[in-house]
Amino acid sequence: MTKFLKNKLSMMTIIAMTSVSLGACNDDNDFNSTSPNTEAPGEVTDPSEPTQKSTVSGKLVSYDGKTPIANALVYVVGQPNALNSRIATSLYSASSLDVEAEEPMIDSIATECGVAPEDSLASTCTNADGSYNLDIETDTKDLMIKFEKGAFTAEQKITLQDTGSSQAGVTELSDTVLQSVPKMVVIEGSYDSIELILAKLGLASTDAKTGEITESEFDLWNSTDNLFVDNNNDGKADIYDYEIVFFNCGQNGLSWLMDDSKRQILKDYISKGGRIYVSDHAYDIVEQTFPEYIDFFGSDDTPTNQPETMYQANQGQGGITIKSNIEPKLKSWLEGVTCAQGSCLNADGTVTIKGFAGGWARMNSVNSSKKVDIYASGQDSDKAMRPLTVAFNYGSGRVTYTSYHNEEGSDYCYDEFINGNLDNEEYYECLENPTEFAESELNAQQRILQYLVFEL
């Protein structure tokens, strides 16, 4: 654990997890041994068979201690009993499974949020508010609960006590020394600052006066240069040192995209499990590398599997406000958190997104033949319905792109600039000053980007 989280933990009261109890168990756990059945003389019972069903209930939240983590995989490590192993839930529908058939023992349990990567006694998904219930059958008292969400993982040891069910309480990702923060790097930008979203999630601290990042769980670079070189001489580009790379809008140049070898490094990195987040003017990182997934604004004559000329999509009108439709799971999550204006949702269930930069990058559509998730979409100033936030898997990795910024403050700076109230230097100082955001409550679009961090 890094110094930042250690300092954070020293100021927190770690929630002791109460847990589930089981009935009395036979000490002999040998699968080949038997013992007399006192209730039915003359019969024998396998002592390794679970003796009682129990439930563990809890809630998973981020490092800030309050932001719920939805649709995370939760499972209990352990080998199911050979005589009773069944698939508890299906990846999509239990109706596709013959749970009555005598099937061989399985190593993991499938859920809609994933498959436990190791032997598991029980598995489930967190709800929109981060809550979960785990039904367990075991004769073991000491267990390990593991959590997985995107690139984020954690694990918690629990000891089952003598009750049929128990509340595990609120588990923060930083509650356990066994937790793992994925290695992340943020490429700074002039018009965006995803690093402040990470700070709001408890992954960094900020200066009280300036709002700037002081300590963090991630690296913060002002250039992409070091991503594509092997500074540590381990035989591969340094981008492989990170599980997630955040590319802010307005970063220091995109000329590296003209280098075929660097684009191939990025593509291979994602294919092998890397995850990237890209915002607004940095869109060409996606367009030049994965043109077949998203149709960005440009020439109608360009085939969908070929990239447009760079910067062609930078056609959006700055300072506009869009009432955006959002996908159901994100909507459910937003219903359970608060925003600066109170509810994050409008009365009609949409979300208000503000602060689009001048020349923001427009998407026309996503490729229907590819599995591209659309988190937000809305009607542009030209009356066209456009995706605004999308993501897709590539190999073992994931790409997330958003056309808008993580703070609406940029429209204020832009309006003041075009109205003559700010000169060039003052304009850029306005864009780069995060104090107001650091001290304020999150608005709806910032909440969406919090949610997306755990979708990476």
Image (cartoon, rainbow, N blue to C red):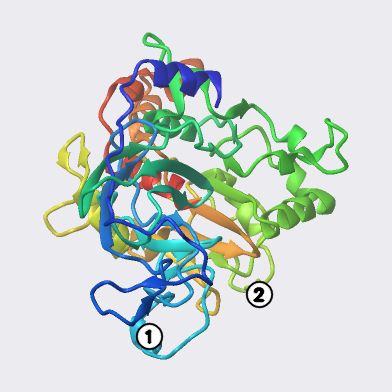
Q: Which mark is residue 303?
A: 2
User: Where does residue 436 sit, x and y in percent of width and height?
Assistant: 32, 21
**48 on left or right of 19:** right
User: Where does residue 171 sit, x and y in percent of width and height?
Assistant: 33, 39
Q: Determine if residue 433 is in view.
A: no
Q: Mark 1: which secondary structure? A: loop
Query: Which residue is rendered at x = 80% and y = 42% of the image?
Result: 237
Query: Which residue is rendered at x = 66% and y = 40% of the image?
Result: 242
Q: Which mark is residue 434?
A: none
Q: Quadrant of residue 356?
A: top left
Residue placed under numbered mark 1 in the picture: 99
Q: Nearer the viewer, residue 291 or 456?
A: 456
Amino acid type shown at disc 2: Pro
Amino acid type shown at disc 1: Val
**220 on left or right of 95:** right
In three-dimensional space, the C-alpha distance between marks 1 and 2, rounded to whole angstroms, equals 48 Å
